[in-house]
Image (cartoon, rainbow, N blue to C red):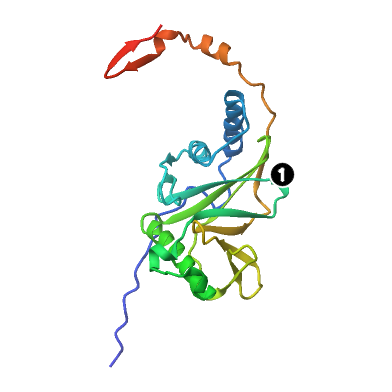
Amino acid sequence: MTEKKAPRLRTVNKSLPPYELNKFPNDFAFKLGRELVYLLATKGNPTLEGSEWEEIFANCIGAKWKPSNVGLDDVVLGSCAWGAKTVKAKKPAVQKTVRLISGRNSPVYSFGEKQIAEVNPDHLGSQVLEIWNERVSAIRKLYKFVRTVVLLKSDNLDEVAVFEYDTVRFDQELYEWKWNERGNLEGYLKRTKEHCFTWQPHGSQFTIIEEVPDDSLVIKIRIPKRIDKEELLQTIGFDNSWVTTSLNRGFATSG
């Protein structure tokens, strides 16, 4: 009797990312440079916080900015979600590795551990990674593509480097853990002894160490002159009628 063959099916994956990983749209660099110049001209000091970077990145790629408690899907475009990170660097263009704070992973809360100092470090490290993995899995149920986009920024924001990588789960069997002199738990890749993670028991802060790719996008800008506050207010026609003050439950117009 001839064995019955299973039918061959046509499968088509119609879900594609907005662009190839770490290959930003053609106008991305100029849009980001424009945002940085505007920020410096209006803000007056070279500070760029995480939430600001999330919004700027979303604007530069035409995505939606939706701040998330998880921190893995702060920016969304179609079937792709990004977590956004900023890190200071003296020379962003030549930075080789970066330490990324990646949430608070608490084995005490998630697994009911009591005496952290007495727990086997490999067991504890596996629990830390398992918490991270569950977080990533939950986001990947919602989005086909999950990435992290990193902005390395100089002290005065005249130079930045941008890169992104896939946000992935980590195989716990590939890593070994040990306590360092500061009382923090460090995770190393067994095969190469490369330092990959740091976990701080006080606060449960989890840090991932990532390599900066050679093809990171480096952007340099000219520092603009700060816009004078009084001139700006005059330009937009500001006067005291724009301001109201609250007295108990009533409102009174100041001026």
Residue 17, position in %: x, y? 47, 51
Identify whether 97 is placed above or below 78. Answer: below
| Total marks placed | 1
Identify whether 51 is placed above or below 97. Answer: above
Q: Quadrant of the N terminus?
A: bottom left
Element type where label 1 sits in the image: loop
Q: Does 107 sit left or right of 163 as displayed? A: left
Residue 162, position in %: x, y? 61, 45
The residue nearer to you, when weighing 14 against 168, is: 168
According to the picture, the residue beneath numbered tag 1 turns out to be: 90
Residue at image location 58% in from the left, 29% down from the top: 39
Residue 96, position in %: x, y? 69, 55
Instruction: Report the amino acid beneath label 1.
Output: Lys
The residue nearer to you, when weighing 220 against 176, is: 176
Residue 9, position in %: x, y? 34, 69
The residue nearer to you, when weighing 128 against 189, is: 128
Identify whether 34 is placed above or below 15. Answer: above
Q: Does 18 sit left or right of 6 as displayed? A: right
